[in-house]
Amino acid sequence: MRTDQPTVDLRAYCEARYPQVVVLPGANPSCGPGWNAVLTTAVDRMAAVMAARPGSAIYLEQVKEKYGTLRIYWYGKAMTRRQHRRIDIIESLAEERSGCVCETCGAPAYIRVSESGNVHTACDAHSDDPPEEGKGPREFTVTRPISRRRRISEGMTYDFESDRLVVLSRRTETNSHWKRKRLEARLED
Ligand SMILES: [Zn+2]
C-alpha cells in the first residue's frame, strides 16, 4: 500500500465534477490519505443523489477524523426528505468503512486505542496499539418517520465486503411524542 500520496483535495475533486456538491473553503479533509477512496466514494454517491433533483445542493462544512472514524458535516439546499435520508446513509457508510480501513495507508484495519486513550484506525504496520474492546461490526439504530403518527426503527450493521448497511431488525413505532403534542393541542382548544 502506498503511504507517500497526499490526502485527496476533495474541494478540487468536486469542483471539477460535481456542481451540486460544494466543499466549503477550509473544509478539505484533515484526515490521512488512507481514507481517500472512502472520501471520493462518498462524494460520488452524494453527487448521484443530488443529480436526481436539479437545484438541490449539498455543502460540506467539515471533513475530519473523530474518535478514530471519518466524520462529514454537511447541510443541504432545496433537498427532499428522501435525499436527506439517502445522504444520511452515505455518511454512515463512509463513517463505518473508515473504521475498517487504515487512515495512513488504506489497508484493512481495526479501531485501536493507545495507552493514553487516543482512538485511531490503523493496520498492523501502522500501529502497535491493541484493537478497541468489543471490536467487530457495530450495530446501530436508524429511525425515520413514515407518517405523522408512525416511525420506523431499523437496527443496522455495516458489511465491509458489499459496502452496504444491512438491516438486522425493523419495527414500527407510534410517535408518542407527536401524540402527546396532539393531546396538548386539543386540551388547549
Ligand atoms: Zn496502514
Image: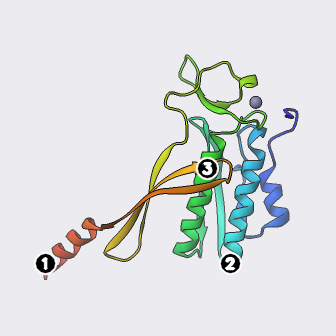
Q: Position of residue 53 (x, y in %)?
A: 66, 79
Can residue 24 be seen by looking at this rendering? no
Could you say which is closer to the camera, residue 97 or residue 83?
97
Snapshot quadrant of residue 34: top right
Name the residue type under label 1.
Glu
Ligand 1 quadrant assignment? top right
Q: CA distance from mark 2 to mark 3?
A: 26 Å
Q: Which mark's residue is nearer the viewer, 3 or 1?
A: 3
- Residue 44 lies left or right of residue 63; in this view the side is right
Using the rendered view, name the quadrant where residue 30 is placed.
top right
Residue 161 to residue 126: above or below: below
Q: Looking at the picture, how far across and down is residue 15, in whole percent?
A: 81, 62
The reply to whether residue 115 is visible in this rendering is yes
Between marks 1 and 2, how big is the CA–CA gap?
A: 43 Å
On the picture, is 134 further left or further right than 128? Answer: left
What residue does disc 3 label? 159
Q: Which residue is mark 2?
A: 52
> Looking at the image, is mark 3 or mark 1 earlier in the sequence?
3
| SS for dot 1 | helix
Q: Amino acid at mark 3?
A: Asp
> Residue at the spot x=62%, y=20% of the render?
129
Q: Nearer the viewer, residue 178 or 169?
A: 169
Indicate the quadrant containing the N terminus: top left, top right, bottom left or bottom right: top right
Amino acid carrying label 2: it is: Ala
Q: Identify the residue shown where x is 13% and y is 83%.
A: 189
Q: Secondary structure at mark 2?
A: loop
Q: Residues within 10 Å of mark 2 (few under 14, many from 20)?
A: few
- Which residue was labeled with disc 1? 188
Cβ of mark 3 under 8 A from ligand 1? no
Q: Position of residue 166 (x, y in %)?
A: 55, 56
